[in-house]
Image (cartoon, rainbow, N blue to C red):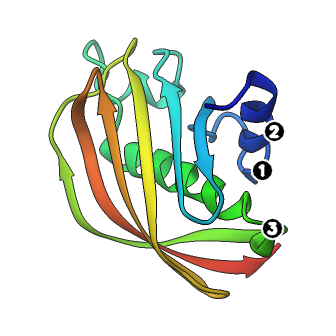
Amino acid sequence: MTTREESDALVALLPHGPPFRFVDAVDAVEPGTSVTGRYRVTGDEAFLAGHFPGNPVFPGVIQLEALAQTGAIAVLADERYAGKLPLFGGVEKVRFRRLVVPGDELVMTVELERLSARGGWGQGTATVEGQTACAARLFFALASA
């Protein structure tokens, strides 16, 4: 488990900033290997006003983005990739299994399967209260920042 200061430093590795950062905290990281992070859906996210009016649902594509950002922390925490820019390259085997709504906290785990100087693959799962909300295999490319 990480301390609050370590968690904040790991989240700060992301090139994303509010309102497009979907990782609030990092619970554990093994640089270049795996990461577990969290994001609480507050209901204040601007896009929820239209997705769906009167019945806000956290979009599946944003769940995938949250998983990709979480995985990027595992990559950027590895000193071999410091200063790189991980770019979302694609997804495979995506499944959405549960609605995510305001008040829910996504717990996201990403295990990197392959990592090279040019990019890699990771397997990501987002859960809410122990139930799988989203699972996918994520592809990313590494660019110079």
Q: Is residue 140 left or right of residue 50?
A: right
What residue is at 76 percent from the left and 72 percent from the top? 81
Q: CA distance from mark 3 to mark 2?
A: 14 Å
What residue is at 57 percent from the left and 51 percent from the top? 69
Q: Nearer the viewer, residue 116 or 52?
A: 116
Q: Amino acid at mark 3?
A: Glu
- Mark 2 — residue? 9
What residue is at 80 percent from the left and 67 percent from the top? 79
Identify the mark at residue 79; answer none if there is no mark: 3
Q: Amino acid at mark 2?
A: Ala
Q: x%, y% of residue 57?
A: 29, 26
Q: Amino acid at mark 1?
A: Leu
Up the image or down, 56 lies above or below 118; here it is above
| 3 vs 2, front mark | 3
Q: Is residue 17 left or right of residue 62?
A: right
Q: CA distance from mark 2 to mark 1?
A: 7 Å
Residue at the farthest left position: 97
Q: Is residue 23 left or right of residue 84?
A: left
User: Could you classify mark 1 by the number of other residues whose Cα lies within 10 Å: few (under 14), some (14-19), or many (20 or more)?
Assistant: some
Q: CA distance from mark 3 to mark 1?
A: 11 Å
Identify the mark at residue 53; answer none if there is no mark: none
Identify the mark at residue 13; answer none if there is no mark: 1
